[in-house]
Image (cartoon, helix red, strand yellow):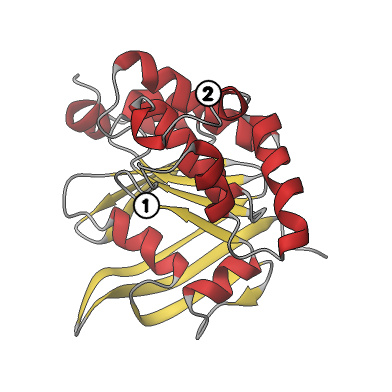
Amino acid sequence: MADAALLRVDGLSAGYAETPIIVDVSFGLARGSITTVIGGNGAGKSTLLRAIYGLNRQFGGDIRLDGRSLRGHDPAMRLAAGIGLVPQGRCNFPRLSVRENLELGAHSLPLRRVPAAIDRVVALFPMLGRKSRTMAGNLSGGEQQILETAMVLEAEPKLLLLDEPSLGLSPLMLGEVFATIRTMRDAGVTVMMVEQNVRGAMAVSDTVIVMELGTKTLEGPPAEIGNDPRIKAAYLGA
């Protein structure tokens, strides 16, 4: 029987140089779900995403995608296997047009597949078509986040990792970016994101994971996590 989880992380310890930042972390991601990771600065949230994508050192444990271990797989191999990462901060080419950014985003695809890949993400996010000739640096923060996400989606990942997608955005753009995340989930992409805007993230998530000092301390549905007195006090202003 097929595993109901797209991704399974078992006893993962990972970090940089000789020091693990996250220790003995385990969870599963249901297919077609949105999972948000919350926690204070230094909790290991971004390190966790980077470990899943193969960007740091894995000290122990295992990461399995569709039941297959990713141990020894570099980021290019993990992208080919179906994992995409949109890192924190702006990561487009600001002096190139939206269309040119999308062409660059499809670099891992055979040339014959590039036009269809661009058409697919433009259909998902029509703004990219309307502003295809606009320089990426002239887009709003929210529009740039959508562009960067679309560039990763061109490779048709099964799992999309988002690191602080709402960072630095205006309240108006926050809603647009969270709506974009729902759109991706509805299109069949499993999403895992690190997010400081806890209320906004919980509103679109199926599962919330809480990280503290490199370990997972809580996991559950947003309603359950949001009612925990510790979470209310630390993240929800209660």
Up/down of 25 relative to 226, above or below: below
Q: Are marks 1 and 2 in contact (CB under 8 Å)?
A: no
Tell me which amino acid carries mark 1: Pro
Residue depicted at 54% across the width and 35% down the height: 206
| Label at residue 68 | none
Crowd around label 1: few <14 · some 14–19 · many ≥20 (10 Å):
some
Q: Quadrant of residue 125?
A: top right
Residue 191 seen in this snapshot: no
- Residue 208 in percent (x, y) is at 43, 40
Q: Nearer the viewer, residue 77 or 194?
A: 77
Crowd around label 2: few <14 · some 14–19 · many ≥20 (10 Å):
few
- Residue 163 in percent (x, y) is at 36, 47
In this image, 95 relative to 63: left or right? left
Residue depicted at 44% across the width and 28% down the height: 143
Tell me which amino acid carries mark 2: Ala
Count up the numbered dots.
2
Q: Residue furthest top?
A: 172
Label 1 vs 2, first from the N-terminus: 1
In this image, 89 relative to 83: left or right? left
Residue 198 seen in this snapshot: yes
Residue depicted at 50% across the width and 27% down the height: 204
| Label at residue 87 | 1
- Residue 52 in percent (x, y) is at 45, 66
The residue to which callout 2 is attached is 179
Residue depicted at 33% across the width and 41% down the height: 164
Q: Nearer the viewer, residue 125 or 73?
A: 125
In this image, 205 relative to 119: left or right? left
